[in-house]
């Protein structure tokens, strides 16, 4: 692959001032600003993006859309809202917002600042997996298509609730059984029209260039709850006539028409059985005729998990993002010869990109271990990249941040594995410091060259941080991603221990007598597994953790995770699931453990933490279970996020602060 990126040698962001810096503190979190969703105007002259700030004391969050000139970086306008999308002529922006007693989709006039309400799309709480309920402008600007539920929400009831479907749970509640359909509404205002109403869910929409058809994704199998067989369809907006574009045994996502309307690209899988969350198979990029036919895979030689794909304005390239050895890289591929080129890549992560209408300029987010995400712009080939926003410069200039040192090691079987080490703030030569092993979720997630407020918090509290991408992680190819299948707690656990040993060998400051371990979701599973396999850790914190793979199967939102990862229905081989369940080995645990869990987490039900917690207490091991009301898998309320981090640091302080320093 040929690299076109000038960012490999670009100075990274704006360097913080060296004088009078202090480590981050938990109270500093409210001063941070998050930047996301950069959207280039059709002419490339302006970027609309979302700037948000969370107040962890008042439990509130502010979200604003900012318009900034790409040439000068001057802010041209700011208004409350999120998810901005430019009209094709660039004169107005559609966005999600709330004004007085109305919330939903609004239109903002760029020249005058005038706003008008368009529609409030009702949303079902039924979970469709990796399927956005999005909206999009028609290319001629006359309409906006959006995904909405097929009726109002049912009235709440305190009475009995009867269920007859597999996916009766949502991420934090229970399905209201409404369907999601594609609607269109005149952009000037008027009555919405449902163009796909019926007995199935439709979502993930994209317009054809002629503004006459909409591509969407739908699972029209006999029992969508029991499969993940999304296919791509198109619908004629005027007549409602449907065309099924793909007919594969697996799932498709994110359709996009080519500029000439002849082709549709999409992301998808080849394997017939995958899970709605954290699949083992890396996502691939395909192109198919807009009226159907045999799909053709693009970027076949890359062997990476592909996301965020779309056509360049002229149709010469399809752009996409993929994780690559701790980085997130923007690539482009020529559909004619399948040649892949790197556009933006380096020791950082790039996400959430967009191109102008002609495909000459790209806007994207960029982040690394000492810089939160900011908006950058570059030529479409990656050249002349420059930073456009710098919202956290003043904040960062007064804080001493800890950079991460990358390392690679040979694991137990010779597999090369990547990791990072972050020193504690103010570390002095010759001293030893307590250190926390952090474990990512997934299992097919991954750490990398990116900002982590949580890791900075731990370093500021005086802890070293070691984080590793064991087998199962993304960014290293399909064979590596498959490394944890049928083997949770096997090779991945041995990778983590070998990586920790390698970090200790290379960093004399790590105090091996004061080690802690923490992870969330699958990382929580692995934390529970770790403490059943070794006594080297003096304290553990398990967030949203799994402990019993047999009971998890029947209580989780996605039963298909166990089916995909262990290639079976759970009852076909209970001994294997029990073998890899931490609860099966709990009698070996001596490590004091804090369990952090949301009470309405239906991804990993709180019963998983309860089973492990109860066992530890029965065994006389010091353990605490902290339950957060109303929270699911990943906390939303700022006060609870702050509280959970504070409790974690206090737990490690209790068990890791004594000893040599």
Image (spheres, rainbow, N blue to C red):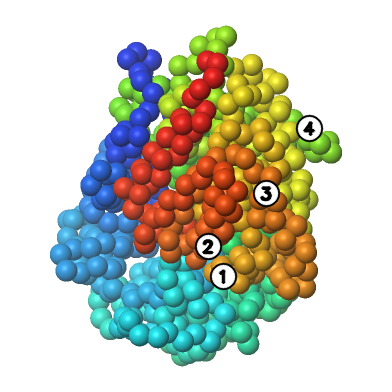
Residue where numbered disc 3 is placed: 587
State left or right for residue 176 relative to residue 519. Answer: left
Q: CA distance from mark 1 to mark 2?
A: 9 Å
Q: Mark 4 touching mark 3, by CB under 8 A?
A: no
Crowding at mark 2 (Cα within 10 Å: few <14, some 14-19, many 20+): many
Q: Which residue is mark 4?
A: 410
- Observer able to see residue 573: yes
Secondary structure of the residue carrying tag 1 is: helix
> Which numbered disc, 2 or 4, marks the residue that appears first in the sequence?
4
Mark 2 vs mark 3: give the one in front.
3
What kind of element bears circle 3? helix
Q: Which residue is mark 2?
A: 607
Q: Residues within 10 Å of mark 3 (few under 14, many from 20)?
A: some
What distance separates the C-alpha of mark 3 from that of mark 1? Answer: 24 Å
Asked if the residues shown at circle 1 and circle 2 are in contact, with their CB atoms under 8 angstroms apart, the answer is yes
* In-front residue for pair 563/351: 563
Mark 2 vs mark 4: in front: 2
Give coordinates of residue 150: x percent, y percent: 39, 84
Q: Name the spot of residue 469 as percent of width and height, x first.
A: 66, 41
């Amino acid at each position: 692959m040929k690299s076109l990126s000038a960012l490999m040698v670009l100075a990274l962001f704006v360097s913080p001032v060296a004088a009078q810096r202090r480590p981050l503190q938990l109270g500093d979190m409210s001063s941070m600003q998050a930047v996301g969703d950069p959207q280039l105007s059709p002419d490339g002259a302006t970027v609309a993006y979302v700037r948000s700030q969370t107040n962890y004391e008042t439990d509130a969050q502010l979200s604003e859309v900012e318009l900034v000139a790409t040439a000068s970086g001057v802010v041209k306008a700011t208004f409350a809202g999120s998810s901005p999308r430019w009209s094709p002529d660039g004169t107005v922006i559609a966005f999600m917002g709330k004004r007085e007693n109305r919330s939903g989709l609004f239109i903002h006039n760029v020249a005058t600042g005038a706003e008008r309400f368009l529609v409030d799309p009702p949303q079902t709480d039924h979970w469709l997996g990796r399927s956005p309920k999005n909206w999009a402008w028609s290319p001629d600007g006359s309409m906006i298509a959006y995904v909405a539920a097929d009726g109002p929400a049912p009235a709440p009831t305190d009475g009995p609730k009867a269920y007859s479907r597999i996916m009766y749970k949502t991420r934090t509640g229970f399905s209201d059984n409404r369907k999601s359909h594609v609607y269109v509404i005149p952009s000037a205002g008027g009555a919405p029209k449902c163009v796909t109403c019926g007995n199935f869910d439709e979502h993930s929409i994209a317009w054809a260039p002629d503004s006459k058809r909409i591509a969407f994704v739908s699972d029209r199998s006999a029992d969508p709850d029991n499969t993940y067989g999304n296919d791509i369809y198109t619908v004629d907006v005027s007549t409602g006539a449907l065309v099924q574009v793909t007919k594969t045994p697996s799932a498709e996502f994110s359709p996009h028409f080519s500029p000439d309307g002849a082709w549709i690209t999409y992301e998808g899988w080849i394997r017939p059985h995958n899970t709605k969350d954290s699949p083992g198979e890396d996502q691939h990029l395909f192109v198919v005729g807009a009226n159907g036919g045999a799909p053709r895979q693009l970027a076949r030689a890359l062997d990476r998990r592909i996301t965020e794909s779309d056509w360049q304005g002229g149709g010469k390239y399809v752009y996409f993002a993929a994780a690559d050895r701790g980085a997130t890289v923007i690539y482009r591929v020529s559909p004619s010869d399948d040649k892949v080129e790197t556009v933006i890549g380096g020791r950082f992560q790039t996400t959430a990109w967009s191109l102008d209408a002609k495909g000459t300029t790209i806007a994207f987010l960029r982040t690394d271990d000492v810089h939160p995400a900011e908006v950058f712009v570059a030529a479409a080939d990656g050249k002349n990249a420059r930073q456009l926003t710098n919202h956290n410069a003043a904040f960062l200039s007064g804080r001493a941040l800890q950079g991460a040192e990358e390392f690679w090691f040979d694991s137990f079987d010779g597999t090369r594995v990547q990791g990072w080490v972050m020193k504690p703030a103010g570390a002095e030569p010759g001293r030893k410091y307590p250190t926390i092993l952090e474990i990512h979720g997934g299992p097919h997630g991954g750490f990398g060259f990116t900002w982590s407020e949580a890791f900075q918090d731990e370093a500021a509290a005086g802890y070293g941080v070691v984080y590793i991408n064991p087998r199962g992680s993304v960014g290293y190819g399909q064979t590596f991603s498959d490394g944890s299948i049928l083997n949770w707690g096997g090779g991945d656990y041995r990778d983590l221990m070998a990586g920790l040993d390698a970090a200790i060998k290379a960093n004399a400051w790590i105090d091996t007598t004061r080690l802690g371990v923490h992870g969330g979701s699958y990382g929580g599973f692995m934390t529970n597994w770790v403490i059943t396999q070794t006594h080297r850790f003096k304290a553990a914190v398990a967030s949203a953790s799994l402990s019993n793979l047999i009971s998890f199967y029947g209580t989780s939102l996605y039963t298909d995770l166990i089916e995909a990862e262990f290639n079976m229905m759970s009852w076909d081989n209970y001994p294997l699931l029990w073998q890899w369940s931490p609860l099966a080995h709990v009698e070996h645990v001596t490590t004091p453990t804090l369990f952090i869990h949301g009470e309405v987490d239906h991804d990993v039900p709180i019963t998983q933490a309860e089973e492990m917690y109860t066992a530890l207490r029965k065994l006389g091991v010091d353990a605490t279970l902290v339950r957060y009301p109303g929270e699911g898998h990943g906390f939303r309320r700022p006060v609870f996020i702050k509280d959970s981090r504070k409790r974690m640091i206090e737990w490690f302080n209790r068990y890791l602060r004594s000893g040599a320093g």
